[in-house]
Amino acid sequence: SVADSVRIVEVGPRDGLQNEAAHLSIENRVAFIEKLLDAGLATVEAGSFVSPRWVPQMQGTDEVLRRLAGVGAGLPVLVPNLTGLEAAIAAGAREVAVFVAASEAFSLRNLNCSVDDSLERYAPVIERALEAGLAVRGYISCVLGCPYEGRVPSAAVVWLAARLHRQGCYEVSLGDTIGVGTPMQARTLVREVAGELPVGALAVHFHDTYGQALANIYGALQEGVSVVDASAGGLGGCPYARGASGNVATEAVVYMLDGMGVRTGVALPKLIEAVRFVHARLGREPASAVYRAMTAR
Ligand code: HMG
Ligand code: MG
């Protein structure tokens, strides 16, 4: 049955902004995050400690974290290796996220190494993070399809999810990086993964390329999932997945869950204001239907 409340992990300031052509200033990134927190989002992914040559948009995440020290909310950041982890710790991060892929070709593009090598590289990263008292979240990309390899066997996803959980990730987020999945596939995958680890340790992360994200989330909720990643305004995409659009819009998820009587703790009007704010800085209109409906006049 569907959970009474859902925790939304807002990924707009990271997954969203990492793929925008316009690079936002530190001030604007901090202000965007503050507006999201003010809207009631308890977890806001604040950025990533990756190579600035690979993803220049996320440069300065250390400064973003420093300016937000003291907000007392969950502000996870992505780290690809020990270099990133040490920088995150130095900037005051309390939670980091590691990311692996269920397909070899995507792993090579995104992390410049094979899936096995990424797990080997991450083992000491996770260990060190846990020792330092940080929480570690794990992402798996391409769970319902890969831009280079096409179909991805669910067994690979199940195996990776179990492994990340065993290594100490308190939560594993299943990512449909290119947004190709459909609801029954999403549901079946969640059920299979939940056969190996507690469903409470699972999150879903749908991009909306084919407009299926909300339906996929609905399917995952039926399987007992209660953590959903989303991006304000449906910002972003993925730099290593051409044609992929942004994550499901946070306001779409909140609107659907409000209608279902599922608590999120998020105030829609304040969230809409955060969406307006960031898109004005990016110089473009939000793609989100809920935003358009709520701001139509
Ligand atoms: P590499 O070139 O193989 O790494 O990149 P390297 O160790 O050989 O280092 C190369 C250079 O990068 C060196 O600098 C390092 O110092 C530097 P140089 O000597 O050439 O001047 N470097 C770093 N700098 C800053 N921070 C670091 C760092 N590490 C090395 N942490 C690497 C390997 C993993 C670093 C690179 O491939 C990388 O940064 N990748 C990040 C890719 C990324 O951010 N992808 C997007 C996020 S994942 C995602 O969006 C999916 C998700 O949303 C879920 C879903 O939708 O599926 C999570
Ligand atoms: Mg993503």
Image (spheres, grey):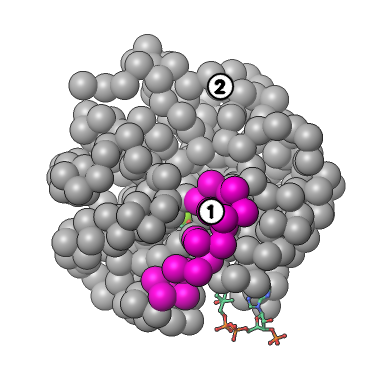
**Residue ID for mark 2:** 266
Above or below, comparing residue 181 to residue 148 in the picture: above
The location of residue 268, given as percent across then percent down, is 57, 21
The location of residue 125, given as percent across then percent down, is 53, 66
Residue located at (25% from left, 30% from top): 224
Q: Quadrant of the C terminus?
A: top right
**Hey, what amino acid is under mark 1?**
Leu
Above or below, comparing residue 196 to residue 249 in the picture: below
Above or below, comparing residue 229 to residue 179 in the picture: above
Residue in front for this viewpoint, 158 or 53: 158
Select label 2 or label 1 by which is in front.
1
Q: Residue furthest front?
A: 131
Residue located at (37% from left, 12% from top): 261
* Crowding at mark 1 (Cα within 10 Å: few <14, some 14-19, many 20+): some
| Residue 25 in the figure: left or right of residue 264 | right
Residue 58 can be seen in this image: no
Please, what is the dominant secondary structure of the magenta stretch? helix
Residue located at (16% from left, 44% from top): 195
Q: CA distance from mark 2 to mark 1?
A: 30 Å
Q: Which mark is residue 288?
A: none
Which quadrant of the picture is home to ligand 1?
bottom right
Whether residue 257 appears in magenta in the rendering, the answer is no
| Boundaries of the magenta span | 118-136
The location of residue 225, given as percent across then percent down, is 30, 33
Residue located at (26% from left, 22% from top): 2
Q: Residue furthest top?
A: 261
Q: Earlier in the sequence, mark 2 or mark 1?
A: 1
| Residue 39 in the figure: left or right of residue 29 | left
Q: Secondary structure at mark 2?
A: loop
The location of residue 71, given as percent across then percent down, is 75, 32
**Hey, what amino acid is under mark 2?**
Val
**Residue ID for mark 1:** 130
